[in-house]
Image (cartoon, rainbow, N blue to C red):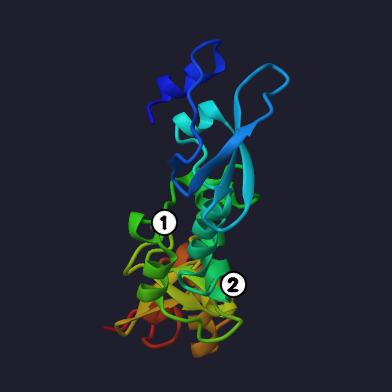
Amino acid sequence: MPESSIRRSSGPGNFIDLTGKRFGHLEVMQRSENSEKGATRWLCQCDCGNEKVVFAANLGRSNTTSCGCARRKISSDRSKTHGMRKSPEYRCWAGMLTRCTNPNDKSFLRYGARGITVCDRWRNSFEAFFSDVGPKPSLFHTIDRWPDCRGNYEPGNVRWATDAEQRRNKSNNVFVEIGGERLCLSDACRKFGVKRLTARSRLFDLGWTPEEAFGLRERGCP
């Protein structure tokens, strides 16, 4: 029924009986007492069996189309779509969104404020994120932007990583190319038995090549 017709029911001589009319999941049963300000109200029964008193104006505007069960069902269906709301993968996904989009998050300055974003495909769907990234290998793995630690959260630039892998992938890490292999400085020092301060001095103060700095080629030899 048009909104204008329902509104007329509150005026003298313009009463329109809505008994038996349907509005979404609601069927009007009978007239209810007016509100304290004189607005017309109707007692309705929902398809689920519950009764609800509704303002006539809200029926006309389709603001109220159920006792509330329809809204609760939609919310419940959304939360049950993937059945993983309490999973560690879902928590990682939610945390990723929060630190990139919520200025009140404690990590926002290091992510969203720096322009780091989540791609549309993942921002709008946990299912898409989980399909692309897969399950966590263990409870100790976290989401990591790799191989570009300055890039965004998007397919091709994300992996599940251990704490050690996360530390090696920090934007302030120093990397060296040795024999076609790219290693962070700390890993190269452990692999070739060279102290970190010694390696840094050779590389940045003396200008040695990585092969020279880590003893794979004698200084001055071809």
Residue drawn at (59%, 77%) of the image: 163
Q: Nearer the viewer, residue 56 or 138?
A: 56
For label 2, the SS is helix
Q: Is residue 114 left or right of residue 34?
A: left
Dot 1 amino acid type: Arg
Q: Give the left or right position of residue 53, taking residue 170 as reference.
A: right
Whether residue 177 is visible, yes or no, is yes
- 110 or 2: nearer the viewer: 2
**Residue picked out by circle 2:** 197
The foreground one among 157 and 169 is: 157
Disc 1 element = helix
Q: Counting other residues with Cα less than 10 Å from the Cα at mark 1, is it few (<14), some (14-19), or many (20 or more)?
A: some
Q: Position of residue 104 (x, y in %)?
A: 63, 43
| Residue 118 falls in image quadrant | bottom left
Image position, residue 16 (x, y; %):
48, 23
Instruction: Name the N-terminal-most of marks 1 and 2.
Output: 1
Q: Position of residue 42 (x, y in %)?
A: 59, 34
Indicate the quadrant containing the C terminus: top left, top right, bottom left or bottom right: bottom left
Percent coordinates x, y for residue 132 in the rendering: 35, 73
* Residue that appears at 69% across and 28% down: 33
The quarter of the picture where the N terminus appears is top left
Residue 198 picture quarter: bottom right
Q: Is residue 1 above or below residue 190?
A: above
Residue occupying the far right of the picture: 36
| Amino acid of disc 2 | Leu
Residue 123: mark in rendering: 1
Neighbours of disc 2 within 10 Å: few (<14), some (14-19), many (20+): few
